[in-house]
Image (cartoon, rainbow, N blue to C red):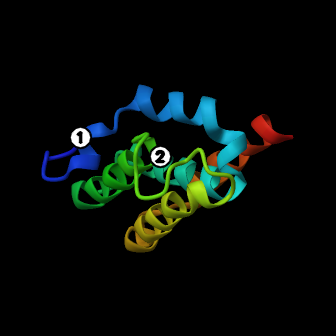
């Protein structure tokens, strides 16, 4: 997916994303998880252009990397930097976020969190 031009994009792959989600969804919280899932569903959409996918892969790569600016093990603050990266990516690719991406993310949240 990534062109290799950034370190975090190299860290992203589908299995690393789902491992992080499974292990940290509750700790990360709904807001982080919803943004990550929305980006993921946009990423796998065939209509999403390559430039947008590069941005998404970079943000999701930052999310899955265990060592980042603020360690994810810190309560509350640990995912603040991840939230910022995900929110920035969402803003940059907003024109390509479809209602179905948001709906799939919300459905997954309902399954996981009730």
Question: Label 1, on which residue?
Answer: 10
Check contact, mark 2 vs mark 1: CB within 8 A. Answer: no
Seen at 52% across and 61% down, the residue is: 98
Q: Residues within 10 Å of mark 2 (few under 14, many from 20)?
A: many
Image spot of residue 32 (x, y percent): 61, 55
Q: Upstream in the sequence, badge 2 or badge 1?
A: 1
Residue 96 lies, with reference to residue 9, above or below; the image says: below
The residue nearer to you, when weighing 62 against 45, is 62
| Mark closer to the observer (2, 1) | 1
Residue corresponding to mark 2: 40
Q: Residue at x 38, y 72 (%)?
A: 92
Residue 101: percent from the left, percent from the top? Answer: 56, 52
Q: Residue at left 47%, top 46%?
A: 40
In this view, 73 is above or below 38: above
Q: Is residue 71 above or below residue 17?
A: below
Q: Position of residue 95 (x, y in %)?
A: 42, 72
* Alpha carbon distance from label 2 to label 1: 16 Å
């Amino acid at each position: 997916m990534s062109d290799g031009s950034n370190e975090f994009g190299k860290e992203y792959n589908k299995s690393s994303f789902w491992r992080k989600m499974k292990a940290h969804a509750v700790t990360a919280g709904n807001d982080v998880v919803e943004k990550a899932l929305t980006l993921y569903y946009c990423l796998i959409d065939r209509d999403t252009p390559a430039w947008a996918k590069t941005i998404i892969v970079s943000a999701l790569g930052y999310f899955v990397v265990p060592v980042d600016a603020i360690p994810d093990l810190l309560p509350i603050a640990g995912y603040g930097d991840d939230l910022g990266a995900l929110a920035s990516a969402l803003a940059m690719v907003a024109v390509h976020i479809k209602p179905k991406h948001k709906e799939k993310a919300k459905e997954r949240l309902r399954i996981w969190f009730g």
